[in-house]
Image (cartoon, coloured by chain):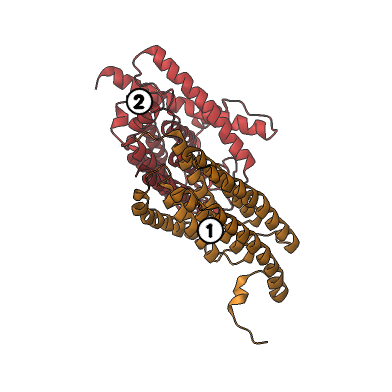
Amino acid sequence: MPTMPLSGQYIHLFASVVLLLSFAMLAQRRIRTLIDLFALQGAALVCSTTIVAWTGDQPHLYYSAALTLLLKVIVLPLILYRLIDRLQLRWDTETGLHIPATMLIGLVLVVFAFGLAQPVSRLAGHVTQSTLGIAIAVVMLAFLMMITRRKAVTQVIGFLAMENGLFFAATSTTYGMPMVVELGIALDVLVGVLILGIFFFQIREQFDSLDLHHLERLREE
Amino acid sequence: MNAAAVLTQLFAVIVAVAAAPLFLGWVNVCRAWLQNRRAPPLAQPYRTIGKLLHKEAVLAHDVSPLFRFAPYAIFGSMATAAAIIPALGLDLPFARAADAIALVGLFATARVFAALAAMDTGTAFGTLGARREMMLGFLAEPALLMVFFTASLIAGSTELPVIAGTHQSHTLAVHPSLAFAAIAFLMVLLAENARIPVDNPSTHLELTMIHEAMVLEYSARHLALIEWAAALKLFNYACMGFALFLPWGVAVDLASPPVLAGALAVLAAKLLLAGAALALIETVNAKIRIFRAPEFLAFAFMLAVLGLLVRLLVQE
């Protein structure tokens, strides 16, 4: 039994929670619960970032944790809630693939991500080294969610979850990105969601539905 | 193997067999309380079994001997499982004979006999129940195995007493993989014991039933044995959960009476809490559609594998 400091154990715990929430999002049919899960994932991310900041003595990570809290736990879920209220999306989201099958594919992706991260994480020296695999897995699961879901709103949540994974990877491998980059990404995500929100209304006006399959054919009009 | 060890082993099995209906009764009482119903007496399962034992057994005309034999086989495998699971003490001589994988095999044996007996009568309900049971079984089994593997990876052995002993001797450490495995185990427990999100234990003659559909043709002592075996299965699963995830308080050596009494008291306390928790889970959840049950179990399997993977990753 390797003796690991308690903070390391907690980082692993929150990393596992982030991974678990990715799977929960993959399996979730209801759009409101999906947004709640996304907010929860953000919260788990905030916790793990704070612990990393505290253990590694990296004060700038506190700022990025606060930024994550503000943006991903509070602002973005609120925006998404307002969006689905105004779009009157209440019903279950459709999935392109059977959910157990999606989860099995997700498991394969996790194995792949863990294998991929192993040689890299061996180079890292600190306590967060093994979380890189989890971060890559989160990114891939978000990819999978964007591929299997048809509705536009769910795809946006998948996109945001992917950003969560990237942020997690940055924190776990290099103690976070420079503050300027992080602020830039945060603003990008915010603006992206706002623009996509406008897109939703346009898509629905054109096709009377938010199913993105309608966008696959070219129409000459 | 000395006489004292054999006696303690025998004692452990007798405690399990005798206490199993009581645990079931406790779960039912808690459920009734939570649902604002008047609770049945705590000893109701004993009364049901006693009543059934006094009745005359009625068999369909064209059943094979397998139909008569199946209840004994089911009860026998559950009692054997109770001997393997370290509920009271860790030094049970029988527990070393079979590991967790053999335990899963024992449960599978019971399931196969139940399904075969259900199909033996040739009624539509029996066959339907048997097919559903096998569908759930083949999904729950890998999940259960994965839970065992996760715990074995941490303990370095697939034997339940060793796993329980290792976890017991550790200082309190945060094991995310074990937490995943615990949730997966809970889901398997609910599915395997015909509990509410998957099957409703209190329905008779409903189209959605699984376990009850299989045992519809049984009566009297056969039915009593099957009901008793079902209670014992729930008890076994609860004790398995304690051995894997809450091993504290299990006696290492059962030789002296005070230690034995202490282990019994701890087990009773754990069962009290577990029964209340189980009733709570059953009350706050709605029964899922049968076609959603594979999804439920796939999630359990996924959780268990995830626990295993996280364990492997963190260990690096």
Residue at 32% across, 35% down: B159
Nearest the viewer among A168 and B3 is A168
Q: Mark 2 lies on which chain?
A: B
Residue at 47% across, 21% down: B266
- Residue B115, visible in the rendered structure: no
> Which x, y percent locates residue A64?
57, 48
Q: Which chain is red?
A: B
Task: Tell me the crowding category of disc 1: few under 14, some 14 to 19, or many 20 or more residues within 10 angstroms, Cα based.
Answer: many
Judged from this view, the residue extending furthest toward the left is B1
**Disc 2 secondary structure class:** loop
> Which x, y percent locates residue B268?
50, 23
Nearest the viewer among A184 and A70 is A184
Q: The orange chain is which one?
A: A
**Identity of the amino acid at label 1?**
Met
Q: Which chain carries label 1?
A: A
Residue at 67% across, 66% down: A195
State the residue position of label 2.
B90
In the picture provided, is A18 more to the left or to the right than B31?
Answer: left
Residue at 50% across, 50% down: A176
Residue A162: which disc?
1
> Which x, y percent locates residue B41?
61, 26
Total numbered circles: 2
In the picture provided, is A215 more to the left or to the right than B303?
Answer: right
- Residue B208, visible in the rendered structure: yes
Q: In which quarter of the image is residue B33?
A: top right
**Disc 1 secondary structure class:** helix
Quarter of the image that includes the N terminus of chain B:
top left
